[in-house]
């Protein structure tokens, strides 16, 4: 008896903890009535886009469509069918008059009225679903290495000077007195002038006449 009672108590505690876990998981989910205070109908069709743009939807939230079951319906479609008001290839179709849809995936969700004329008169809505509220900021990726700043260089200690570079050698000065060319080193002797030539001719003639006179004297 004591063992059975202990086993029963353990099962009750486990069920209680499981229920608490489910309540915690759904504590941040919200339910939104499509259109706000109005119903899913042609009369409220002009305000659906404005309502959806002002409302923040996240994964885990749910949306409620209220409408007359015998007069209207809700069809979830693709983007192309949403633009064309076509329900030929629906993702899901509802006609119970009180449709509750849980948003389990982020991204755009397209809903139109099953009545073509209602859809063409803007009885349709796009629900943009964001990420789950329970995700923490720790899931954000760390910055890539290229985004980190390089380490700054420490300044040189005070009182120390870096050695200055040695001065560049001075360029040689040009020689202002260039060496004479080959033509100026051994100049040719000057040519004899006219006076010296006359003297030389006179001396030669006198010597010849003197020698001829001596020969005649013998």
Image (cartoon, grey):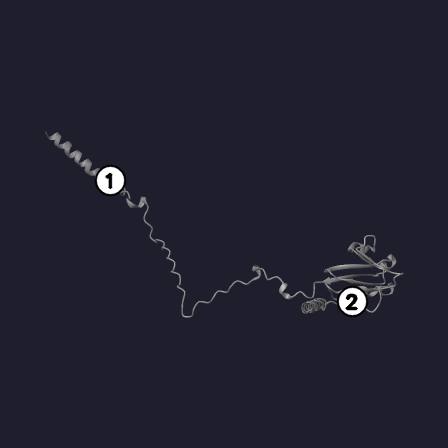
Residue 32: numbered disc: 2
* Residue sitting farthest toward the right: 70
Q: Are marks 1 and 2 in contact (CB under 8 Å)?
A: no
Q: Which residue is mark 1?
A: 197
Q: Residue 1: percent from the left, percent from the top? A: 69, 69
Q: Residue 34 bears which disc, if any?
A: none
Q: Residue furthest front?
A: 1
Q: Position of residue 211 (x, y in %)?
A: 14, 33
Q: Is 193 above or below relative to 167? A: above
Q: Is residue 16 left or right of residue 96?
A: left
Crowd rating for badge 2 (residues with CA inside 10 Å; few <14, some 14–19, many 20+) = some
* The image quarter in which residue 130 lies: bottom right
Give the answer, above or below, for where 56 lies relative to 176. below
* Residue 16 relative to residue 151: left or right: right
Q: Nearer the viewer, residue 202 or 101?
A: 101
Under circle 2, the secondary element is: strand
Q: Nearer the viewer, residue 90 or 56?
A: 90
The residue at the point 64 percent across, 66 percent down is 137
Question: x, y (%) of residue 120?
Answer: 85, 58
Of residue 205 and residue 147, the one placed in the foreground of this image is: 147
- Residue 4 occupies which quadrant of the picture? bottom right
* Disc 1 residue crowd, few under 14, some 14–19, many 20+, Cα 10 Å: few
Q: Nearer the viewer, residue 66 or 199?
A: 66
């Amino acid at each position: 008896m004591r063992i059975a009672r202990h086993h029963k108590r353990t099962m009750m505690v486990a069920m209680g903890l499981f229920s608490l876990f489910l309540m915690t998981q759904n504590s941040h989910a919200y339910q939104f009535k499509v259109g706000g205070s109005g119903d899913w109908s042609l009369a409220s069709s002009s305000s659906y886009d404005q309502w959806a743009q002002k409302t923040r939807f996240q994964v885990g939230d749910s949306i409620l469509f209220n409408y007359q079951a015998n007069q209207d319906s809700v069809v979830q479609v693709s983007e192309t069918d949403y633009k064309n008001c076509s329900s030929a290839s629906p993702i899901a179709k509802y006609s119970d008059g009180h449709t509750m849809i849980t948003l389990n995936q982020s991204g755009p969700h397209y809903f139109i009225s099953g009545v073509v004329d209602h859809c063409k008169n803007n009885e349709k809505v796009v629900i943009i679903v964001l990420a789950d509220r329970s995700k923490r900021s720790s899931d954000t990726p760390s910055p890539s290495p290229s985004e980190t700043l390089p380490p700054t260089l420490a300044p040189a200690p005070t009182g120390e000077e870096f050695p200055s570079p040695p001065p560049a050698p001075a360029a040689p000065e040009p020689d202002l007195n260039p060496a004479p060319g080959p033509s100026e080193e051994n100049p040719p002797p000057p040519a004899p002038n006219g006076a010296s030539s006359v003297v030389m001719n006179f001396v030669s003639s006198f010597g010849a006449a003197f020698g001829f006179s001596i020969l005649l004297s013998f």
